[in-house]
Amino acid sequence: MSLSKFQIAKRIAQELQDGYYVNLGIGIPTLIANYIPENISVVLQSENGLLGMGPFPFKENVDSDLINAGKETITTLKGSALFSSAESFAMIRSGRVDLTVLGAMEVAQNGDIANWKIPGKMVKGMGGAMDLVASAKNIIVAMMHTNKKGQSKLLPNCSLPLTGQHCIKKIVTNLAVIEIVDSKFLLKEYAPGVSIEQIIDSTAGELIVADNVCQMKID
Amino acid sequence: MKKVYKNAEQAIFDVEDNSTIMLGGFGLCGIPENLISALVKRGTRGLTCISNNAGVDDFGIGLLLKTKQVRKMISSYVGENAEFERQLLNNELEVELIPQGTLAERCRAAGAGIPAFYTPSGVGTEIAQNKEKRIFDGKTFILETAFKSDFAFIKAWKGDTLGNLVYKGTARNFNPMMATAGKITIVEVEHLVEVGELDPNEIHTPNIYVNRIFEGQNYEKRIEKITTQ
């Protein structure tokens, strides 16, 4: 069985470390906030201008002046700080965000990522993604291994317009945990019930199986 | 000099066709609702709008798109607006999409007397095409220029009659930089107070940047995605 999007989020939550400042993109990455280990403290950065993003509000506390980058209503926490968009991206560009997790349409084996445009079809824009991938110290991509047509999203080269180049180091999909080493995909973990052959078949780029490959630990 | 105006209609008396206008806000949060409505009513056309987003079909900048008053949008993300996408795919609307941090910094630079700056955002992508590149400490950067705009339309929470501003929550977003960047900066506030009522320690935008201010009315403050526990 491949992982659900909740299990992908759970697996990525294991990468969090005490004291991390983390930016979570829209979609699967947002779910990671629900699985932060209780024994560590991390600060969530929302690029529209908040450090210390809290959970969704109770119905009676909804505030139209308090939203996250996905335009959802949120709350502040003790110790939260509010600031402008210029300040927000100053933090991002200067490398103070320890970990960025975002979704992707395509990732190439050289670490290129495409997630903002399908020429002639989808015109939405890159939002903050280009700034985040250009500057974050550590970026994890959270995505399904294949697209809706069943085609691999892990490619020799991206076919869509790039969001950033040579910037992705780790990918967590519904099938596997994959690192990018020397411009190749390196299979580190497979999802419970998923065979290595299945992962190889679903990966269009060059995939090396790590010597110490193991099964993902998801409770 | 008197900066206080009675309402949005009066505050935009000299906004002409083909103006370039910055509009604060992220999604529908912190947008200048009264100024947008007044602009719809005024019927000013051929506008270039610099704003992170383009509103939704029936609110925010979406209202100006519906009436075809916008010639060009400069934004980072425009995904919530079907009318926008229709006009774009039919070549009725010109669009420049730029990274959000670059958008913010181009506003900041405009208000800070900085004509251009180098940023890593967009290196190796189509954003970098035809832009000057330079390597600092082994990393490639591209040159981006400050925006030029005729007007900045700003929404603040509180303001005094001199133009000192305080924003609330994440409604701050692009408003502080844009407030510094307009040739003429027009501000609507939820609460207009007398000089002396705001604590000087807590001013977000100092009054020197503000040309006109008024107390807005009938704030809708619509929420795009109400999410609760």
Image: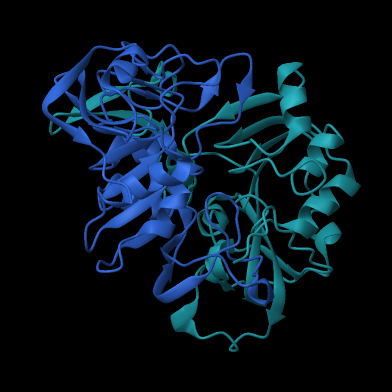
Asked if residue B38 lies left or right of residue B49, the reply is right
Asked if residue A3 lies left or right of residue B168, the reply is left
Coordinates of residue B92 in the picture (x, y in percent): 77, 20
Q: Is residue A143 visible?
A: yes
Which colour style is shown?
by chain
Coordinates of residue B194 in the picture (x, y in percent): 67, 86
The correct choice, above or below, for B109 with respect to B124 in the image is below
Q: Is residue B116 visible?
A: no
Tell me the residue at 25%/49% (across/down): A15
The correct choice, above or below, for B124 with respect to A29 in the image is above
Tell me the residue at 28%/48% (across/down): A99
Coordinates of residue A141 in the picture (x, y in percent): 35, 35
Asked if residue A41 lies left or right of residue A143, the reply is left
Supply the letter of whichever chain is cyan. Answer: B
Tell me the residue at 25%/66% (across/down): A40
Seen from the viewer's position, the closer of residues A162 and A31 is A31
- Chain A representation colour: blue
